[in-house]
Every structure is written in C-alpha cells, then in structure tokens.
Amino acid sequence: MIPYGHQSLDESDIDAVADVLRSDWLTQGPMAPRFGRAVADYCGAAHGVAMSSATAGLHLACLALGLGPGERLWSSPISFVASANCGRYCGAEVDFVDVEPASGNLSIDALERKLELAEQQGRLPKVLVTVHFAGQPVDLAGIDRLRVQYGFKLIEDAAHALGAGFADSRIGDCRYSDATVFSFHPVKPITSGEGGVLTTNDPELAAQVGRLLCHGISRDPALMQGESDGPWYYQQIELGYNYRMSDIQAALGLSQLQRLDQFVARRRALAERYERLLAGLPLTPLARLPGRQSGWHLYVVRLDAGAGITRRQLFEAMRAAGIGVQVHYIPIHLQPYYRDQGFAEGDLPGAEAFYQSVLTLPLYPELSEAQQDEVVEALRQALA
Ligand SMILES: *Cc1c(COP(=O)(O)O)cnc(C)c1O
C-alpha cells in the first residue's frame, strides 16, 4: 500500500536520538527548550515552547488566553477534532465558521457575517482557532481586520503548515495571531514521534504555557508566595498538566528541522507534477490562493459532480489498487460528540459539500515519481 503520508527519517535522525539515549537526560534536559527555540527562530517568532503534542499546545494556548466556562471558541469544521476540543477542555462553548469549498479554508465572508450576528446577540467569541488546511495559509490579513474590529484572540492551528508563508510573513511568526501551534506527529511536515511547539511573540503567554505544561510549577522566586524554603524549593502556583516533550523526541525534531525546507521543496515539486498528470480527469485540485506559499502537507482533490462515480466508489477502487487514499476531514460538527452539543447536518453547507467530494492522494517527500505514476494510473482506471 502506498500511504497518503509518511515520515522521512535518515541516519542523522537516528544518530541524534541515539546521542540522547547515551546522555544523562531523557527528559527535562536541554533538548526540548532548544527545539522550541529552533522552531521559533525558523518561523521568526520571539518565543517557542515545545510540548507533548499540538493538542496539548492548543489546550494550553486557550488556557493562557483566559478561555473559560461561559465563553466561546470558534473553529473551522474542516480540521482534526483537536482544533475544537481545546475549547471544550476549558469548559467553553464551541461553534464553527464555514469554509470555502474551493480551498477548505475558513471563509472570511462567513466569519464576518457570523461576527455581525454574534455582536447583535452579545455572543462574540473570545478565541478563534484557524487552520491552514493542507498547508495552504488562510487569509490571515482578512482575519486580522476582523480581529481588530471585534477583539477576539487568534490561535493558528498550523499542524499542516510548518514551512508555509502568507505574503511576506512566515507561518509561525505570529504577525497576525496570539499563538501558533505546530504538530510533529509522523504524518506532519517534520516529526518528533509525537510532539508540538507553540510559538508566540508574547513573553507572558510563553512563560505561562511553559509552567502549565509542567504542573503549573515554578522555581522563580518572583512568582512565589512568601520566601523560598531553600534551593530545592518550588511552588505550584496554578493547575497545570504533564504535557512535556522528552529530550528523545526533541532531538529527533531538531534533526528533522534541518531538512524541512528540502522536504517542502520536494512536496511542492510532487504537487505540481500531480497537477500536470491529473489534467483531463474529473478531479479538481484545491484552489491555489494568491500570495501564499503552501507547505503542501496534503494533496487534496475534489471529485467533479459529473464524474459518473461516487467518492466512496473512487475511494474503494483506490484502496483495492493498493493506494492509501484518505478523506480530510469529516466535518467536526457532525461527530456524535458535537451533535450531542446541538449541531446537525445542514449547519455548515460549505464544509459538508467539501467533505462529500474530497479525496487525499499520497504525498510525502519519499514518494517516487514511479509511485506517483501508479497513483495516477489507478485514478485513470477507476474513473474510466
Ligand atoms: C494533527 C493535527 C492536530 C493534532 O496534532 P497532535 O500533535 O497529534 O496533537 C491538530 N490539528 C490539526 C489540523 C492536525 O492535522
């Protein structure tokens, strides 16, 4: 089976991990802070904090932005469930902004209309989580205009978008957002096994996230109540978690980061090759939005209405041919957990139409041109 995504590891990655295994520190050593800083430096942000996953990063970003019960988080329905669950972890109400079916990214028009209505009803969101779907940046300038007007906080879920850019801004520099969160799960642009990094330009937010990922504990005398008892002393000053990244993971992430640009360039070349090879088939690639450099995390096509085959039939034919196609994503509001919160079919027509038509084709740096030809030949036969 040719999978839809796969990690690219080499001997330098294996050596980097082995070095940590031979060192004194498997966790809470120098590597996780170093990895957080390296990602922030790559993106051009002031601070970067490494943690156990992007899900943990989204949760802590929401907490540090003060999201709580009685407040609202809005997210994109075309994402992984973690983009919405972070609001529920904080006891907030979650709602969704519809997407543009051509790109799968949040619709600025839909956001503007929903904000107007919410203002009239006194139900404005405290936090918006936006996703750079498939690695292509959302219109950050458009969202920023509305952020200034309505005063919500913005978290970029950039799990797909390390190495991507919007105009002359690199995703993760937080020019338009309060925080950006990256994932290092093996299918993502680079991997640490499991892991996440939060970048921000707000020193207070970075410090608080750093405490929350380690139980809310601090050794900083300036933050303590009363005097320190001695050199061993720490205080728990708020309720935190164990969301640490180990040094083993961070070493892998640091080693992978050195090849990120190479990976993105290879993904782009393969994506452009797909576009040429698919011409003439009843498949439409995601719209390429102006002024964006995609990270090409996923190669998503939409099945045209008159194709004479359903998406399910196409999916099954591809799987039978040994091609590990996928569907990104089942709209979050249609998950049973969110239906129980009151959502139903028809609430977000753009997201639902998108879901009905999409198929993710294999794309990862080590996909060979011969394998890519095999994918296209299988599509040709299924669509014939
Ligand atoms: C993978 C992913 C996440 C979750 O990342 P983890 O590191 O596995 O927690 C969140 N959002 C999106 C859009 C993702 O693709």
Image (cartoon, rainbow, N blue to C red):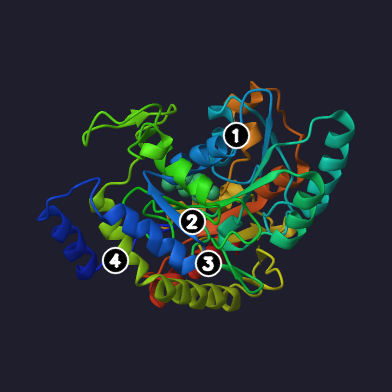
Are discs 2 and 1 less than 8 Å apart at CB? Answer: no
Q: Secondary structure at mark 4?
A: helix
Give me the C-alpha separation between circle 4 and circle 2.
34 Å
Q: Which mark is residue 66?
A: 1
> For the point 79% across and 47% down, which residue is it?
111
- The three-letter amino acid code for the residue at tag 4 is Ser
Using a 10 Å C-alpha cutoff, classify the residue at mark 2 as few (fewer than 14 neighbours), some (14 to 19) or many (20 or more).
many
Quarter of the N terminus within the rendering? bottom left
The front one of 299 and 181 is 181
Q: Would you name the residue on which mark 4 appears?
A: 255
Q: Is residue 308 left or right of residue 185?
A: right
Residue 15 is left or right of residue 374, and the answer is left
Q: Which one is earlier in the sequence, the residue at label 3 or at label 4?
A: 4
Q: How far from the left and from the top, in percent, is residue 187?
A: 41, 55
Sequence-earlier tag: 3 or 1: 1
Helix, strand or loop status at disc 1: loop
Residue type, mark 1 in image = Gly
Find the distance from the CA under tag 3 to the CA under tag 1. Answer: 31 Å
Relative depth, front residue between 66 and 235: 235
**Image: 140 above or below 195:** below
Q: Residue at x 36, y 54 (%)?
A: 186
Residues at circles 3 and 1 in contact by the CB criterion of under 8 Å: no
The answer to which of marks 2 and 1 sits earlier in the sequence is: 1
Type of amino acid at the residue the image marks with label 2: Met
The residue that label 2 is drawn on is 318
Q: Dot 1, crowdedness within 10 Å: few (<14), some or many (≥20)? A: some
Q: Is residue 225 above or below residue 18?
A: above
* Residue at image coords 69%, 56%: 308
The kind of residue on which mark 3 rests is: Gly
Furthest residue to the left?
22
Query: Which element carries disc 3, helix, strand or loop?
Result: loop
